[in-house]
Amino acid sequence: MASACRIFCKNIKNTPLSKIITTKLRVSTMEFIRPYSHGEEQDKLATLKHGAFAEFYEKTKENKQVVEEDQDFEMLLRNSNFINLGDPEGKQVIGTIFHIVDNDLYIDFGWKFHCVCTRPIKNADSFVRGSQVKLRIKSLELATRFLGSEKDLTLLEADAALLSLHKPIKY
């Protein structure tokens, strides 16, 4: 603090008081920095490890943004998991029961439409909303030409057979 006062007094000796008050005093901060540790103490401070938060901050400080190149629709479709799956008929999938009406289970298995299966008689209490079940896909979309119709009509459902309970819901 004494060195700061000396620098301040040295700078204002021949300056009138009115000029000191109206002007901004700029004092270099480098003149006030004094090392408080010498030799081995500085080396010890340099080798100290950072805490977990400091390490996390250092890792995330660098902004790592991955820029993906624009791909056309044809390439995206060709490389998608849906196309690589092949013909869905006969494939086994896992779905989640999201709605129940009487003995009908509405099951979402992650494709365009959900399927509706009847609740099995055996172990019927286990098939509740939120349970995961195994399904065998018959058709991804129930669409057909009905009597006298010129156009196909879809029921907005998939056709699947309920195989078993995969994971019961835990309360």
Image: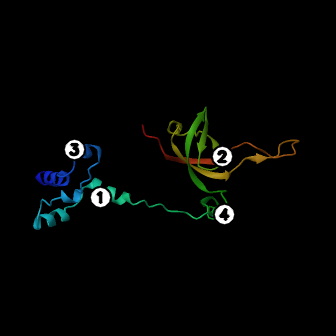
- Which amino acid, mark 3? Leu
| Disc 4 target residue | 72
Q: CA distance from mark 3 to mark 1?
A: 51 Å
Q: Are marks 3 and 4 in contact (CB under 8 Å)?
A: no
- Mark 2 Cα shell of 10 Å, populated few (<14), some (14-19), many (≥20): some
Query: Of all residues shown, which one is farthest toward the top?
Result: 102
Depth check: give the residue in front, 10 or 155: 10
Depth check: give the residue in front, 12 or 1: 12
Q: Kindly report which numbered mark, 3 or 1, lies closer to the viewer in this rendering.
A: 3
Q: Which mark is residue 17?
A: 3
Q: CA distance from mark 3 to mark 2?
A: 84 Å
Depth check: give the residue in front, 82 or 162: 82
Residue 166 location in percent, x, y?
Answer: 50, 48
Q: Which mark is residue 113?
A: 2
- Which amino acid, mark 4? Asp
Q: Earlier in the sequence, mark 2 or mark 4?
A: 4
Q: CA distance from mark 3 to mark 4?
A: 73 Å
Q: Kindly report which numbered mark, 3 or 2, lies closer to the viewer in this rendering.
A: 3
- Mark 3 Cα shell of 10 Å, populated few (<14), some (14-19), many (≥20): few
Q: Earlier in the sequence, mark 1 or mark 4?
A: 1
Q: CA distance from mark 2 to mark 1?
A: 46 Å
| Disc 1 target residue | 55
Q: In the drawing, does residue 99 fall left or right of residue 44?
A: right
- Which amino acid, mark 1? Glu
> Helix, strand, or loop for circle 3?
helix
Q: Residue at x 14, y 51 (%)?
A: 5
Q: Are marks 3 and 2 in contact (CB under 8 Å)?
A: no
Q: Are marks 3 and 1 in contact (CB under 8 Å)?
A: no
